[in-house]
Amino acid sequence: MITYVNTVFVSDTNAVVESLDGISASDKGKFVLYDVDNNAYDLTANTQRFKIGMITGKTVKKVDYHTGATTNVPIIKWSNIIQTADIKSLSTLEYKADSEDTIAIDFTNAQEIGAGKLLSQAGKRIIVRLTFKDLPTRYRKWTESYEYVTKDGDTAVTIATGIANLINKQWKRARVNATAAAGVLTLTAMPYDDDDMVDSLNWAEKVRFNANVYYTDPAGEGWESLNKHFPKGLTITKTPGFRYAASAKLVRDREAQGMGYEGILNRGEGTWPIIKPDMNTKLDGQYNALTLEFENMYRSADDLFRKTKQTVEIYVNGAALTTIAGKIKTAMGKNDRVILDEISEDGIADE
């Protein structure tokens, strides 16, 4: 995702209103596409500047100081003005479920395992070493090693089961779940156990890890007792987990960080004063996403041409963004510099 944010919209509906007349609290989450120059609530091929807004469902009192009458005016959260000629890219994402890193360690064909083989004898040390790459520990990685000592008559099944039990037993430091079946040890990354709240100071993260296996023979002679050997025939297969760029907790983080551009900084528990609007993200939501990048040009005080890099991010729970994207594309029709990203299943944009 983009590392800078200007405006973030999170909603449960993809509806677009064509007029602000009669707007009420029931219209919360609906979007507004406003043509600034033509004073119209629609985008056409002639649109040169427009704004994107979202109805918040709240109102503010408007006072007519001539008559004293008051009316309730809906509050709309607006983006900055977007110049169609300065749009750089429009990208969309369709929801895909996340998955965790999984590693399968297959002991069944290990040449050191079997009747009369080395690891079927008692006293051999089998170490499964896990290297975690997601911890914010500067340039270092964190490792956890699990040691299984063989017994007489051990097989691939008993070794895989023994290591799985060893990992699961030490649950306080575990960052993976271990299962064993037919001599195959399967390690699955655990999801981050943050406070699972929308109003959170935690940032979304994902466990990433690798695994290695070796054994030593403490009864060996001389240096052989310290040498580390890889069991020949053992296979380690890794299936990387998929992290959807608009999963619920990432959307939560984007919405919270986007508030910083509105001057809302103290927005978490343990800070005072807590001044923030309500968050719209739902942690069980399945969000589709739209990202609009643009670089509006302006003249600086010394009469130089400058550009401000800005974005609008829209996240809608369980609804496609084809209507909004289609209207924006209509306004962008004359822009020959735009990049329309089609996101493939692996999360990489195809140009």
Image (tube, helix red, strand yellow):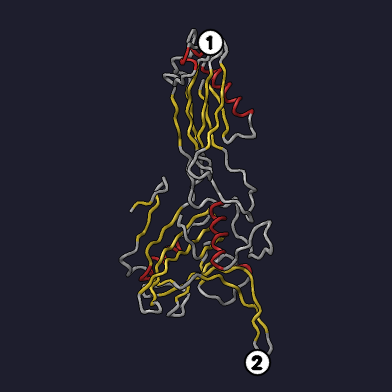
309 over 241 or under it: above or below? below
> x%, y% of residue 129?
51, 29
Q: What residue sits 37% from the left and 64% below the top?
A: 88
60 over 181 or under it: above or below? below
Q: Are marks 2 and 1 in contact (CB under 8 Å)?
A: no
> x%, y% of residue 10?
55, 60
Q: What residue sits 35% from the left and 74% below the top?
A: 305
Question: Is 350 situated left or right of 212 in this image?
Answer: left
Secondary structure, mark 1, is loop
Q: Residues within 10 Å of mark 1 (few under 14, many from 20)?
A: some
Residue 12 visible from this viewpoint: no
Whichever of callouts 2 and 1 sits on the residue coming sooner in the sequence is 2
Label disc, if present, on residue 121 of the rendered structure: 1
Question: Is 235 situated left or right of 78 in this image?
Answer: left
The residue sitting at the top extreme is 116
Hey, what amino acid is under mark 2? Answer: His
Hey, what amino acid is under mark 1? Answer: Gln
Q: Quadrant of the C terminus?
A: bottom left
Secondary structure, mark 2, is loop
> x%, y% of residue 309?
42, 66
> x%, y% of residue 127?
52, 24
Viewer-proximal residue, 232 or 115?
232
Q: What residue sits 47% from the left and 64% below the top?
A: 312
Tag in front: 2 or 1: 1
Viewer-proximal residue, 249 or 13?
249
According to the picture, the residue beneath numbered tag 2 turns out to be 66
61 over 319 or under it: above or below? below
The residue sitting at the bottom extreme is 66
Whole-Å distance between the Cαs marked 2 and 1? 97 Å
Label disc, if present, on residue 263 of the rendered structure: none
Residue 171 visible from this viewpoint: yes
